[in-house]
Amino acid sequence: MQPSNVLILGASYGSLLATRLLMAGHRVTLVCTRGTAELINRDGTLVRFPVKGRGELVAVDSRALPGQLTAVTPEQVVPAAYDLVVLGMQDAQYGADGVRQLMARVAAARKPCLAIMNMPPLPYLQRVPGLDTAALRACYTDPAVWDGFDPALVSLASPDPQAFRPPEQPKNVLQVGLPTNFKAARFEAPAHTDLLRRLESDIEQARFSVDGEPLQLPVKLKVHDSLFVPLAKWPMLVTGNYRCIQADGMRSIRDAVHGDLEHARRIYQWVVDLCTRLGAAPEDLVPFDKYAQAAASLLKPSSAARALFGGATDIERVDKLVQLIARQLGQPSTFVDDTVRLVDERLARNRAA
């Protein structure tokens, strides 16, 4: 097997996919801040996975894996050296000085880019027939970041796995809370989709040895022919993640969903219907009952809620994206409008402070 060179922007959530690629023997470069890069180059990354049938988390140290890991700052990156670019940062981070210039170099290098973001890149949405993406630019912190990208070279993976940095742990440590899969849509060019399928196969075959026992770890890459599979995350985000945000505080994803299960079911189904109108097939999406079962174990507020109530002045606005798409399709919703209003109000308060 010839190892692939994969560039991943974002060393937090990105280190999860990086670990699975390193297990399969590939070469990964993580883009992050100078301090985090120095930490990772010295101590590697440590990702803790829950594994079915084992009481304790399985800790995977990148230094013990067959692949090669390097961490760099944005200005050090030459995108032409890579086979695949993975976009693993939050929307607001792409406009930061240094990252913005790197994104321009990535676009110019014409390398296939796979986003593992909740917020789909604008070039990916340009691949969805019938969408007026110019009217969606207001959902992005810095939409001009995406202007140089060829939509044919941009795809999206639904970032279903939940992971977090444990409190009081260094920035090279990540813990997986919900060990589901990255579900990627195909690229337009068969050669680029073939690359994803090779990575999918390599991750599937990789094993991690614990006390002499070869374990198949969770969180895999699954590649789909449908362009719409990554939209499966939208009903989850609108029903759970953004509804953690309340006027006077935040609540857990479990409480947002299970506090009134039938109301949550109606919201979820409305977003499913919206995705279907865009072109998704029923099998592309996740049934509500399966999502509700997973949500029952999500005992913390969403990262968007935690960021907002931590004073963030920008967060990813999938809520607003869904609102504007629904209006384009003549399908507005008062509950989405209410959610967008709550987020807008909290952001305005944070920016004023």
Image: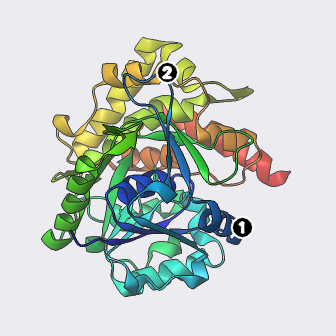
- Report which residue position mark 2 lands on: 297
* Residue 202 in picture, x, y percent from top left: 24, 56
**230 in relation to 33, above or below:** above
- Report which residue position mark 1 lands on: 35
* Residue 240 in picture, x, y percent from top left: 49, 29
Disc 2 residue type?
Answer: Ser
Disc 1 residue type?
Answer: Gly
* Residue 19 in picture, x, y percent from top left: 43, 54
Q: Is residue 331 visible?
A: no
Tell me how far mark 1 sits from mark 2, CA to CA: 33 Å
Q: Which residue sits furthest front? A: 212
Q: Residue at x 49, y 56 (%)?
A: 62
Q: Secondary structure at mark 2?
A: loop
Q: Quadrant of the N terminus?
A: bottom left
Mark 1 Cα within 10 Å, few/some/many (few <14, many 20+)? few
Q: Which residue is nearer to you in this view: 317 or 175?
A: 175
Q: Residue at x 45, y 31 (%)?
A: 50
- Mark earlier in primary sequence (1, 2): 1
Q: Is residue 296 visible?
A: yes
* Residue 288 in picture, x, y percent from top left: 33, 23
Q: Which residue is nearer to you in this view: 220 or 296?
A: 220
Q: In the figure, residue 185 lies in which quadrant? A: bottom left
For residue 121, side relative to residue 289 (left or right): right
Q: Which residue is nearer to you in this view: 95 or 267?
A: 95
Q: Which residue is nearer to you in this view: 291 or 170?
A: 170
Q: Residue at x 49, y 14 (%)?
A: 258
